[in-house]
Image (cartoon, rainbow, N blue to C red):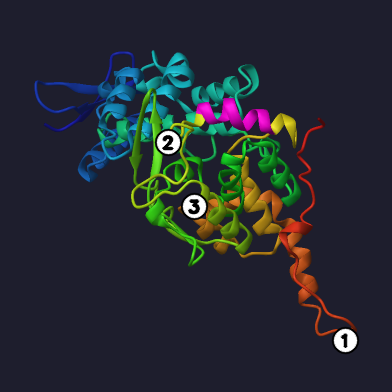
Amino acid sequence: MAGHVRRLESGRWIARFPLGGRGRFRSRTFPRKLDATRWLSSQTARRDRGDWVDPAHADEIFQVVAEAWLASRRDVAASTRARDAAYLRSQILPHLGKLRLREVSVEVLDAWVATLDEVEGRAPATTRKAFQIASQILDRAVALRKLPANPAKVGEGVSLPALDPSEMRFLTVEEVGELADACDPRWRALILTGAYTGMRWGELAGLRAKRLDVDAGRVTVASALFEVGANLGHKDPKSAAARRTLTLPPYLVDELREYLDANPVVGDGLVFTDSQGGPLRRSNFGRRTFKPAVRASVGEPCRVHDLRHTQAAWLIANGEHPKTIQTRLGHASISTTLNIYGHLMPGLDEAAAGRLAGPVKHSGSTRPATVTEIPSSKTKKAR
Protein backbone atom coordinates (compact mmCIF):
# COMPACT_ATOMS: atom_id res chain seq x y z
CA MET A 1 0.00 0.00 0.00
CA ALA A 2 1.43 3.32 -1.06
CA GLY A 3 1.30 6.55 0.87
CA HIS A 4 -0.29 9.67 -0.48
CA VAL A 5 -0.55 13.42 -0.05
CA ARG A 6 -3.78 15.39 -0.35
CA ARG A 7 -5.13 18.83 0.44
CA LEU A 8 -7.55 19.37 3.33
CA GLU A 9 -10.49 21.79 3.34
CA SER A 10 -8.47 24.01 5.72
CA GLY A 11 -5.88 24.48 3.01
CA ARG A 12 -3.22 22.42 4.81
CA TRP A 13 -1.70 19.30 3.30
CA ILE A 14 -1.85 15.84 4.86
CA ALA A 15 0.64 13.08 4.18
CA ARG A 16 -0.38 9.51 5.05
CA PHE A 17 2.21 6.77 5.38
CA PRO A 18 1.02 3.10 5.51
CA LEU A 19 2.09 1.21 8.64
CA GLY A 20 1.42 -2.13 7.03
CA GLY A 21 -1.68 -4.31 7.15
CA ARG A 22 -5.25 -3.62 8.27
CA GLY A 23 -5.33 -0.17 6.67
CA ARG A 24 -3.19 1.48 9.38
CA PHE A 25 -1.57 4.80 8.49
CA ARG A 26 0.63 7.38 10.14
CA SER A 27 -0.45 10.90 9.22
CA ARG A 28 1.00 14.38 9.54
CA THR A 29 -0.25 17.72 8.27
CA PHE A 30 1.87 20.53 6.81
CA PRO A 31 1.21 24.06 5.56
CA ARG A 32 2.81 23.32 2.20
CA LYS A 33 2.49 20.40 -0.21
CA LEU A 34 6.28 20.36 -0.64
CA ASP A 35 6.80 19.73 3.09
CA ALA A 36 4.22 16.93 3.11
CA THR A 37 5.81 15.29 0.09
CA ARG A 38 9.29 15.46 1.58
CA TRP A 39 8.09 13.90 4.83
CA LEU A 40 6.39 11.05 3.02
CA SER A 41 9.51 10.47 0.91
CA SER A 42 11.73 10.32 4.00
CA GLN A 43 9.41 7.80 5.70
CA THR A 44 9.32 5.67 2.57
CA ALA A 45 13.12 5.79 2.21
CA ARG A 46 13.61 4.70 5.83
CA ARG A 47 11.18 1.82 5.31
CA ASP A 48 13.03 0.72 2.17
CA ARG A 49 16.38 0.87 4.04
CA GLY A 50 14.93 -1.25 6.81
CA ASP A 51 15.46 1.27 9.62
CA TRP A 52 11.88 2.52 9.95
CA VAL A 53 10.29 2.00 13.38
CA ASP A 54 6.58 2.01 14.09
CA PRO A 55 6.02 4.93 16.52
CA ALA A 56 3.36 2.90 18.33
CA HIS A 57 6.10 0.58 19.65
CA ALA A 58 7.66 3.51 21.50
CA ASP A 59 4.60 3.61 23.75
CA GLU A 60 5.98 0.68 25.75
CA ILE A 61 6.87 1.49 29.36
CA PHE A 62 10.59 1.83 30.12
CA GLN A 63 10.34 -0.47 33.16
CA VAL A 64 8.94 -3.31 31.04
CA VAL A 65 11.86 -3.05 28.62
CA ALA A 66 14.33 -2.73 31.51
CA GLU A 67 13.08 -5.90 33.19
CA ALA A 68 13.20 -7.79 29.89
CA TRP A 69 16.76 -6.54 29.33
CA LEU A 70 17.84 -7.74 32.77
CA ALA A 71 16.31 -11.18 32.18
CA SER A 72 18.10 -11.43 28.82
CA ARG A 73 21.58 -11.00 30.33
CA ARG A 74 22.45 -14.68 30.29
CA ASP A 75 26.07 -14.08 29.29
CA VAL A 76 27.09 -12.29 32.49
CA ALA A 77 27.91 -13.52 35.98
CA ALA A 78 25.21 -13.70 38.64
CA SER A 79 27.04 -11.00 40.57
CA THR A 80 26.81 -8.64 37.59
CA ARG A 81 23.08 -9.27 37.22
CA ALA A 82 22.62 -8.63 40.92
CA ARG A 83 24.56 -5.36 40.65
CA ASP A 84 22.51 -4.23 37.64
CA ALA A 85 19.27 -5.13 39.42
CA ALA A 86 20.34 -3.01 42.38
CA TYR A 87 21.05 -0.03 40.11
CA LEU A 88 17.66 -0.43 38.44
CA ARG A 89 15.86 -0.64 41.76
CA SER A 90 17.56 2.30 43.47
CA GLN A 91 18.61 4.79 40.81
CA ILE A 92 17.02 4.14 37.42
CA LEU A 93 13.43 2.93 37.71
CA PRO A 94 12.36 5.46 40.38
CA HIS A 95 13.13 8.19 37.83
CA LEU A 96 12.58 6.60 34.40
CA GLY A 97 10.53 3.49 35.07
CA LYS A 98 7.04 4.90 34.44
CA LEU A 99 7.95 6.81 31.28
CA ARG A 100 7.10 5.57 27.81
CA LEU A 101 10.11 4.95 25.62
CA ARG A 102 9.26 7.88 23.37
CA GLU A 103 9.32 10.15 26.45
CA VAL A 104 12.91 9.24 27.32
CA SER A 105 14.61 12.11 25.51
CA VAL A 106 18.05 13.65 25.77
CA GLU A 107 16.55 16.37 27.96
CA VAL A 108 14.93 13.82 30.29
CA LEU A 109 18.17 11.85 30.61
CA ASP A 110 20.14 15.02 31.29
CA ALA A 111 17.69 16.05 34.03
CA TRP A 112 17.88 12.56 35.56
CA VAL A 113 21.70 12.63 35.65
CA ALA A 114 21.59 16.09 37.23
CA THR A 115 19.23 14.78 39.92
CA LEU A 116 21.52 11.85 40.76
CA ASP A 117 24.56 14.11 40.83
CA GLU A 118 23.32 17.35 42.38
CA VAL A 119 20.20 16.44 44.36
CA GLU A 120 20.82 12.90 45.57
CA GLY A 121 24.58 13.40 45.81
CA ARG A 122 25.54 10.13 44.13
CA ALA A 123 29.24 9.51 43.54
CA PRO A 124 30.30 10.32 39.95
CA ALA A 125 31.24 6.70 39.30
CA THR A 126 27.81 5.58 40.53
CA THR A 127 25.97 8.08 38.33
CA ARG A 128 28.03 7.08 35.30
CA LYS A 129 27.32 3.38 35.88
CA ALA A 130 23.57 4.05 36.22
CA PHE A 131 23.66 6.01 32.94
CA GLN A 132 25.59 3.20 31.25
CA ILE A 133 22.96 0.64 32.29
CA ALA A 134 20.12 2.89 31.12
CA SER A 135 21.89 3.29 27.78
CA GLN A 136 22.18 -0.49 27.42
CA ILE A 137 18.45 -0.82 28.03
CA LEU A 138 17.74 1.76 25.34
CA ASP A 139 20.13 -0.07 23.01
CA ARG A 140 17.95 -3.14 23.45
CA ALA A 141 14.87 -1.08 22.64
CA VAL A 142 16.55 0.01 19.39
CA ALA A 143 17.52 -3.58 18.56
CA LEU A 144 13.90 -4.67 19.10
CA ARG A 145 12.75 -1.84 16.83
CA LYS A 146 10.89 -0.03 19.57
CA LEU A 147 13.00 3.13 19.11
CA PRO A 148 14.68 4.52 16.00
CA ALA A 149 17.75 5.66 17.97
CA ASN A 150 19.18 5.62 21.48
CA PRO A 151 18.76 9.10 23.01
CA ALA A 152 21.66 8.37 25.39
CA LYS A 153 23.96 8.32 22.36
CA VAL A 154 22.68 11.36 20.49
CA GLY A 155 25.62 13.70 20.04
CA GLU A 156 26.91 15.16 23.29
CA GLY A 157 23.47 15.82 24.73
CA VAL A 158 23.99 14.39 28.23
CA SER A 159 26.78 15.74 30.40
CA LEU A 160 28.08 13.14 32.86
CA PRO A 161 29.92 14.09 36.05
CA ALA A 162 33.68 13.70 35.88
CA LEU A 163 35.20 10.91 37.93
CA ASP A 164 36.45 12.33 41.21
CA PRO A 165 40.10 11.44 41.90
CA SER A 166 39.50 12.22 45.58
CA GLU A 167 37.45 9.03 45.80
CA MET A 168 40.72 7.12 45.49
CA ARG A 169 43.33 6.72 48.18
CA PHE A 170 46.94 6.11 47.23
CA LEU A 171 49.19 4.77 49.95
CA THR A 172 52.97 5.01 50.15
CA VAL A 173 55.05 1.89 50.65
CA GLU A 174 55.49 2.86 54.28
CA GLU A 175 51.73 3.28 54.72
CA VAL A 176 51.03 -0.11 53.20
CA GLY A 177 53.49 -1.58 55.68
CA GLU A 178 51.78 0.22 58.56
CA LEU A 179 48.39 -1.06 57.43
CA ALA A 180 49.64 -4.63 57.11
CA ASP A 181 51.26 -4.43 60.56
CA ALA A 182 48.00 -3.19 62.08
CA CYS A 183 46.14 -6.31 60.95
CA ASP A 184 46.23 -9.70 62.58
CA PRO A 185 49.37 -11.43 61.21
CA ARG A 186 47.09 -13.83 59.32
CA TRP A 187 46.04 -11.03 56.96
CA ARG A 188 49.43 -9.39 56.42
CA ALA A 189 50.18 -11.31 53.21
CA LEU A 190 46.71 -10.55 51.81
CA ILE A 191 47.14 -6.80 52.32
CA LEU A 192 50.62 -6.83 50.77
CA THR A 193 49.51 -8.96 47.81
CA GLY A 194 46.69 -6.53 47.07
CA ALA A 195 49.03 -3.53 47.06
CA TYR A 196 51.97 -5.14 45.24
CA THR A 197 49.94 -6.85 42.48
CA GLY A 198 46.84 -4.66 42.08
CA MET A 199 44.61 -7.75 42.05
CA ARG A 200 40.90 -7.13 42.54
CA TRP A 201 39.26 -8.30 45.76
CA GLY A 202 37.49 -11.19 44.01
CA GLU A 203 40.77 -12.26 42.43
CA LEU A 204 42.52 -12.25 45.82
CA ALA A 205 39.70 -14.08 47.62
CA GLY A 206 39.42 -16.60 44.77
CA LEU A 207 43.15 -17.28 44.39
CA ARG A 208 43.90 -21.02 44.46
CA ALA A 209 47.20 -22.53 45.57
CA LYS A 210 47.92 -24.08 42.16
CA ARG A 211 47.90 -20.58 40.63
CA LEU A 212 50.57 -19.25 42.98
CA ASP A 213 54.17 -20.28 42.25
CA VAL A 214 56.36 -18.66 44.87
CA ASP A 215 59.46 -20.45 43.60
CA ALA A 216 59.04 -18.87 40.18
CA GLY A 217 57.75 -15.62 41.70
CA ARG A 218 54.52 -15.63 39.68
CA VAL A 219 50.77 -15.65 40.26
CA THR A 220 48.17 -16.44 37.61
CA VAL A 221 44.76 -14.77 37.80
CA ALA A 222 42.36 -17.38 36.41
CA SER A 223 39.22 -17.06 38.53
CA ALA A 224 37.51 -14.79 41.01
CA LEU A 225 35.24 -15.25 44.01
CA PHE A 226 31.88 -13.48 43.77
CA GLU A 227 29.08 -12.81 46.23
CA VAL A 228 25.37 -12.58 45.46
CA GLY A 229 23.52 -12.03 48.70
CA ALA A 230 24.35 -14.92 50.98
CA ASN A 231 25.71 -17.05 48.13
CA LEU A 232 29.37 -17.39 47.16
CA GLY A 233 30.74 -18.80 43.94
CA HIS A 234 33.68 -18.75 41.54
CA LYS A 235 33.64 -17.21 38.08
CA ASP A 236 36.03 -16.61 35.23
CA PRO A 237 37.87 -13.27 35.14
CA LYS A 238 35.67 -10.36 34.01
CA SER A 239 37.44 -10.15 30.62
CA ALA A 240 40.14 -11.86 28.59
CA ALA A 241 42.57 -9.17 29.72
CA ALA A 242 41.78 -9.92 33.37
CA ARG A 243 43.16 -13.44 32.90
CA ARG A 244 46.84 -12.70 33.38
CA THR A 245 50.11 -13.85 34.95
CA LEU A 246 51.90 -11.40 37.23
CA THR A 247 55.51 -11.38 38.31
CA LEU A 248 55.85 -10.87 42.04
CA PRO A 249 58.49 -8.57 43.57
CA PRO A 250 61.04 -10.43 45.74
CA TYR A 251 59.77 -8.78 48.93
CA LEU A 252 56.26 -10.10 48.34
CA VAL A 253 57.59 -13.56 47.46
CA ASP A 254 59.30 -13.73 50.86
CA GLU A 255 56.11 -12.63 52.63
CA LEU A 256 53.99 -15.19 50.77
CA ARG A 257 56.49 -17.96 51.43
CA GLU A 258 56.34 -17.20 55.15
CA TYR A 259 52.54 -17.07 55.04
CA LEU A 260 52.25 -20.43 53.25
CA ASP A 261 54.64 -22.05 55.70
CA ALA A 262 52.25 -21.04 58.49
CA ASN A 263 49.08 -21.73 56.45
CA PRO A 264 49.85 -24.63 54.09
CA VAL A 265 47.47 -25.09 51.18
CA VAL A 266 47.71 -27.11 47.96
CA GLY A 267 45.91 -27.66 44.67
CA ASP A 268 42.44 -26.16 44.46
CA GLY A 269 42.63 -24.90 48.03
CA LEU A 270 42.14 -21.16 48.52
CA VAL A 271 45.28 -19.25 49.48
CA PHE A 272 43.42 -16.69 51.59
CA THR A 273 40.55 -17.94 53.78
CA ASP A 274 38.63 -16.88 56.85
CA SER A 275 39.58 -18.07 60.33
CA GLN A 276 37.57 -21.29 59.81
CA GLY A 277 39.22 -22.04 56.48
CA GLY A 278 36.23 -20.97 54.40
CA PRO A 279 36.00 -18.40 51.58
CA LEU A 280 36.47 -14.76 52.52
CA ARG A 281 33.47 -12.45 52.39
CA ARG A 282 34.35 -8.91 51.45
CA SER A 283 31.83 -7.31 53.81
CA ASN A 284 33.00 -9.35 56.80
CA PHE A 285 36.67 -8.76 56.06
CA GLY A 286 36.12 -5.04 55.62
CA ARG A 287 34.08 -4.61 58.79
CA ARG A 288 36.02 -6.92 61.12
CA THR A 289 39.59 -6.59 59.84
CA PHE A 290 40.30 -3.90 57.26
CA LYS A 291 38.47 -0.88 58.69
CA PRO A 292 39.80 -1.36 62.25
CA ALA A 293 43.33 -1.68 60.83
CA VAL A 294 42.86 1.47 58.74
CA ARG A 295 41.73 3.44 61.78
CA ALA A 296 44.68 2.14 63.77
CA SER A 297 47.27 2.97 61.10
CA VAL A 298 46.85 5.15 57.99
CA GLY A 299 43.47 6.68 58.89
CA GLU A 300 40.25 6.87 56.95
CA PRO A 301 39.16 7.03 54.23
CA CYS A 302 40.70 3.87 52.80
CA ARG A 303 38.96 0.94 51.16
CA VAL A 304 40.18 -2.50 50.18
CA HIS A 305 39.96 -1.42 46.52
CA ASP A 306 42.41 1.39 47.27
CA LEU A 307 45.15 -1.25 47.45
CA ARG A 308 44.57 -1.73 43.72
CA HIS A 309 44.66 2.03 43.16
CA THR A 310 47.90 2.14 45.14
CA GLN A 311 49.55 -0.36 42.81
CA ALA A 312 48.53 1.77 39.83
CA ALA A 313 49.94 4.90 41.46
CA TRP A 314 53.25 3.16 42.16
CA LEU A 315 53.55 2.01 38.54
CA ILE A 316 52.77 5.51 37.25
CA ALA A 317 55.25 7.12 39.65
CA ASN A 318 57.92 4.73 38.42
CA GLY A 319 57.29 5.86 34.83
CA GLU A 320 55.81 2.60 33.56
CA HIS A 321 54.15 2.76 30.16
CA PRO A 322 50.32 2.92 30.33
CA LYS A 323 50.14 -0.31 28.32
CA THR A 324 52.20 -2.07 31.00
CA ILE A 325 49.89 -0.68 33.68
CA GLN A 326 46.83 -1.83 31.74
CA THR A 327 48.25 -5.35 31.43
CA ARG A 328 49.23 -5.62 35.08
CA LEU A 329 45.86 -4.37 36.31
CA GLY A 330 43.95 -6.52 33.83
CA HIS A 331 41.96 -3.70 32.23
CA ALA A 332 40.11 -4.67 29.06
CA SER A 333 41.45 -1.61 27.22
CA ILE A 334 44.07 1.06 27.70
CA SER A 335 41.31 3.70 27.60
CA THR A 336 39.98 2.28 30.86
CA THR A 337 43.39 2.73 32.45
CA LEU A 338 43.71 6.29 31.18
CA ASN A 339 40.16 7.22 32.22
CA ILE A 340 40.76 6.05 35.78
CA TYR A 341 44.35 7.11 36.35
CA GLY A 342 45.04 9.72 33.67
CA HIS A 343 45.00 12.50 36.27
CA LEU A 344 48.12 10.96 37.84
CA MET A 345 50.10 10.95 34.61
CA PRO A 346 50.74 14.62 33.62
CA GLY A 347 54.00 14.67 35.58
CA LEU A 348 55.33 11.88 33.40
CA ASP A 349 55.52 14.31 30.48
CA GLU A 350 58.11 16.45 32.27
CA ALA A 351 60.09 13.36 33.19
CA ALA A 352 60.02 12.16 29.58
CA ALA A 353 61.23 15.57 28.36
CA GLY A 354 64.08 15.46 30.87
CA ARG A 355 65.22 12.10 29.55
CA LEU A 356 65.27 13.57 26.03
CA ALA A 357 67.66 16.37 27.03
CA GLY A 358 70.69 14.49 25.71
CA PRO A 359 73.69 12.89 27.36
CA VAL A 360 75.08 14.70 30.38
CA LYS A 361 78.42 14.01 31.97
CA HIS A 362 78.26 13.60 35.67
CA SER A 363 80.12 12.09 38.52
CA GLY A 364 78.61 9.42 40.63
CA SER A 365 75.87 7.05 39.61
CA THR A 366 72.19 7.38 39.06
CA ARG A 367 69.49 4.92 39.91
CA PRO A 368 65.88 4.53 38.86
CA ALA A 369 63.07 5.62 41.11
CA THR A 370 61.68 2.95 43.37
CA VAL A 371 58.31 2.66 44.98
CA THR A 372 59.82 3.70 48.30
CA GLU A 373 60.23 7.21 46.86
CA ILE A 374 56.56 7.74 46.06
CA PRO A 375 55.10 10.70 47.95
CA SER A 376 52.02 10.39 50.10
CA SER A 377 48.71 10.71 48.26
CA LYS A 378 47.53 14.29 47.87
CA THR A 379 43.99 13.05 48.33
CA LYS A 380 44.71 11.76 51.80
CA LYS A 381 42.42 13.39 54.33
CA ALA A 382 43.51 14.62 57.73
CA ARG A 383 43.25 12.09 60.49
Highlighted magenta segment, given as a residue range: 283-293
The amino acid pointed to by label 1 is Lys
Which circle's residue, 1 or 2, is located before the other in the chain?
A: 2
Q: Main secondary structure of the magenta part?
A: helix
Disc 1 and disc 2 in contact, CB within 8 angstroms:
no
Residue 217: within the magenta? no
Viewer-proximal residue, 56 or 332?
332
Residue 372 bears which disc, if any? none
Question: Which of the 4 quarters of the picture holds residue 378?
Answer: top right
Residue 331 bears which disc, if any? 3
Can you see residue 246? Answer: yes
What is the x, y in percent for residue 197? 56, 54
Q: Residue at x 40, y 52 (%)?
A: 209
Secondary element type, mark 1: loop
Q: Is residue 29 left or right of residue 291?
A: left
Q: Which residue is mark 2?
A: 277
Secondary element type, mark 2: loop
Q: Which residue is mark 1?
A: 361
Can you see residue 300? Answer: no
The amino acid pointed to by label 2 is Gly
What is the x, y in percent for residue 66? 34, 24
Residue 290: within the magenta? yes
Which circle's residue, 2 or 3, is located before the other in the chain?
A: 2
Secondary element type, mark 3: loop
